[in-house]
Image (cartoon, helix red, strand yellow):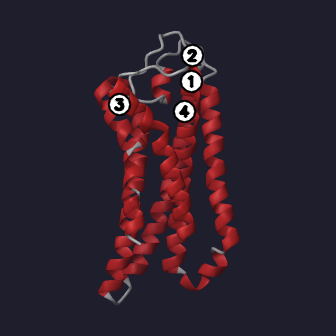
């Protein structure tokens, strides 16, 4: 459990460090410029950390399912080697997803100016600058990523349904409270991240506005890593 928390804290630090320092520089010194390769690096690392974090949250739901529903098999199902393999899979999935999206996004010709209405380099904002119909490839990648993310979300929900069923059978009220206080913050963070990320990337253009885009982006890029300490303190 603490091994996964160590990985999650590193991913939180990475995702915050990718976007917040530049946004603070924009606010303090009004230096809104970012180089082309700086934008590429920011998008790559942001997608890498945020995808790996979501995959790791999925792994952590399985960890809690085994710990609560099958405690006698925990050492067998989640030994040190299995934990390392699952963490490596989360990091690897994040890097692969980030590499695909970054390479595809910046392969598009950009001819609609060079101004992004966002505090960091975000794919929907970059696609608005494209003058090529090949942006549909990136839309397809986003849809695939959303489908995979939804699959992870379903896995998390099913895991927690089983967990809550097991918790409700605990005779001790204190034991039930301890289990719920451990699981509910984790489920709340996952729900916030999934709902806001899906809305940010798939919302209709008819309801898009700079203020709404900014609020939604902050909700999925900054808020989940910031409130993840709730997961740590609930253990």
Q: Where on the picture, by quarter, is residue 132?
A: top right
- Does 33 sit left or right of 234 as displayed? right
The residue identified by callout 4 is 43
Pointer 4 with pointer 1, Cβ within 8 A: no
Gap between marks 1 and 2 measured at Cα: 6 Å
The residue identified by callout 2 is 133
Sequence order check: which comes first, mark 3 or mark 4? 4
Depicted 60 relative to depicted 48: above or below: below
- Does 135 sit left or right of 81 as displayed? left
Sequence order check: which comes first, mark 3 or mark 2? 2
Q: Where on the picture, by quarter, is residue 48?
A: top right
Pointer 1 with pointer 2, Cβ within 8 A: yes
- Does 79 sit left or right of 172 as displayed? right
The residue identified by callout 1 is 136
Crowding at label 3, few (<14), some or many (≥20) Cα neighbours within 10 Å?
Answer: many
Gap between marks 4 and 2 measured at Cα: 21 Å
Outermost residue to the bottom:
171
The residue identified by callout 3 is 213
Kindly state the secondary structure of the residue where label 2 is placed. loop
Provide residue 187's location: percent of width, then percent of height.
40, 61
- Does 208 sit left or right of 159 as displayed? left
Provide residue 19's location: percent of width, then percent of height.
45, 37
Sequence order check: which comes first, mark 1 or mark 3? 1
Provide residue 185's location: percent of width, then percent of height.
36, 63
């Amino acid at each position: 459990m603490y091994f996964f928390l160590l990985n999650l804290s590193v991913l939180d630090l990475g995702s915050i460090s990718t976007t917040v320092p530049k946004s603070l520089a924009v606010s303090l010194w009004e230096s809104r410029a970012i180089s082309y390769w700086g934008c590429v690096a920011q998008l790559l690392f942001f997608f890498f950390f945020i995808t790996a974090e979501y995959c790791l949250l999925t792994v952590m739901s399985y960890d809690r399912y085994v710990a609560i529903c099958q405690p006698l098999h925990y050492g067998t199902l989640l030994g040190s080697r299995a934990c390392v393999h699952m963490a490596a899979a989360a990091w690897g999935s994040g890097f692969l997803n980030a590499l695909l999206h970054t390479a595809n996004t910046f392969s598009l010709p950009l001819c609609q100016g060079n101004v992004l209405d966002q505090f960091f380099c975000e794919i929907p904002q970059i696609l608005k600058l494209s003058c090529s119909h090949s942006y549909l490839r990136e839309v397809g990648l986003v849809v695939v990523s959303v489908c995979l993310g939804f699959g992870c979300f379903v896995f998390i929900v099913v895991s927690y349904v089983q967990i809550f069923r097991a918790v409700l059978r605990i005779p001790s009220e204190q034991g039930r409270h301890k289990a719920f206080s451990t699981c509910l913050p984790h489920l709340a963070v996952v729900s916030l991240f999934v709902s806001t990320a899906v809305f940010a990337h798939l919302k209709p253009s008819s309801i898009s506005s700079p203020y709404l885009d900014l609020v939604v982006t902050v909700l999925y890029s900054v808020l989940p890593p910031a409130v993840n300490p709730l997961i740590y303190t609930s253990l």
